[in-house]
Image (spheres, rainbow, N blue to C red):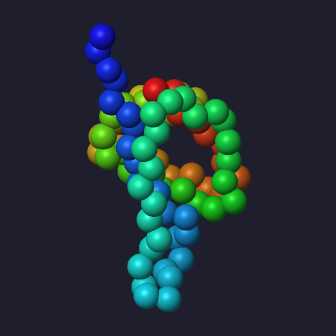
Amino acid sequence: MKRTPALEHFRSRTLLPTATGALRVERLRVAQDCAPHDHDFAEIALIGSGRTRHHSMRGEEKLGAGNVIVLRPGAWHSYEN
């Protein structure tokens, strides 16, 4: 059985510099579908590995390693692996 690699992406919870002048970045590994949700922060997601279908008010997009998405606070989205 072929195993699909999990989606791996990086996001920043803030667009404002921290006290040290750097953005706070989180590394996330998504191994299953992610239900529609929104955030109270801007999200910049860089797809590091894997593939997914990204759903948002703009419709569906196929994303893979090297793609970047930017979401404003309150914008809903989901991932379908």
Spot the residue most to the top: 1
Total numbered labels: 0
**Residue 57: image x %, image y %?**
64, 36
Left or right: 11, with 75 as reference point: left
Instruction: Name the residue located 58 percent from the left edge and 60 percent from the top edge.
Output: 42
* Above or below, 2 relative to 27: above
**Residue 19: image x %, image y %?**
50, 89
* Above or below, 71 relative to 8: below
**Residue 14: image x %, image y %?**
55, 69
* Above or below, 30 relative to 61: below
Which is more toward the observer, 33 or 39?
33
Which is more toward the observer, 4 or 11?
4
Instruction: Name the residue located 43 percent from the left edge and 30 percent from the top edge.
Output: 52
**Is residue 11 visible in the rendered structure shown here?**
yes
Left or right: 34, with 51 as reference point: right
Instruction: Name the residue located 30 percent from the left edge and 10 percent from the top edge.
Output: 1
**Residue 25: image x %, image y %?**
44, 65
Spot the residue most to the bottom: 19
**Is residue 63 visible in the rendered structure shown here?**
no
Write down the quadrant of residue 43 in the picture. bottom right
* Above or below, 26 relative to 3: below
